[in-house]
Amino acid sequence: MHEWALAESVLTAAVETAEKEKLKKITEIKISIGELQQIEQDLFEFALNEIIKQQDKMLKNVKIIIETEESVLKCKNCGHTWKFKDMQKKLKENEAEAIHFIPEVAFVHTRCPRCNSPDFEITIGRGVSITSIKGEK
Ligand SMILES: [Zn+2]
């Protein structure tokens, strides 16, 4: 159920930012979710809407835009970077599925396409962040 906690913290952060900017009302919040972030997007959106309903004027009629951020992997050995998507094409379907639930599985099945090292890290696409906030003063 961490979708609820996540939705709550995103909205709290948005409201705090809006208050700092002296906005009376938030009209749009753009949220970016990493491709490998383990959240149920439907549940996350549902949680957002439920919390917004209980909020005061600040978030009334706010438009939520959710974008997916592509994951990028980086080889620790040679510095080569590649996209999770490209890698996914080469995986068997059940492996790709497993990676979506447990990104760490990627470390078992993957090697750097350039130097074949199994030592790499996920540099982009693991978090949830607010990309932009629009509002009225
Ligand atoms: Zn490499």
Image (cartoon, rainbow, N blue to C red):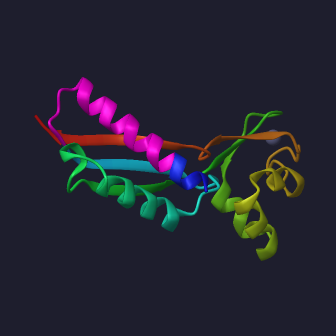
Locate ligand 1 by image quadrant: top right
* Secondary structure mainly formed by the magenta segment: helix
Depth check, front residue: 112 or 6: 6
For this view, does 17 lie left or right of residue 117?
Answer: left
**As drawn, which residue projects farthest toward the left?**
137
Residue 16 image-quadrant placement: top left
Residue 48 image-quadrant placement: bottom left
Q: Position of residue 112 (x, y in %)?
A: 81, 47
**As drawn, which residue projects farthest toward the top?**
20
- Can residue 136 be seen here? yes
Q: Residue at x 83, y 55 (%)?
A: 105
Depth check, front residue: 49 or 83: 49
For this view, does 77 lie left or right of residue 71?
Answer: right
Give the magenta range: 6-25
Q: Residue at x 14, y 36 (%)?
A: 24
Residue 47, magenta (yes or no) = no
Depth check, front residue: 100 or 121: 100
Q: Residue at x 24, y 53 (%)?
A: 62
- Can residue 92 be seen here? no
Q: Position of residue 11 (x, y in %)?
A: 38, 43
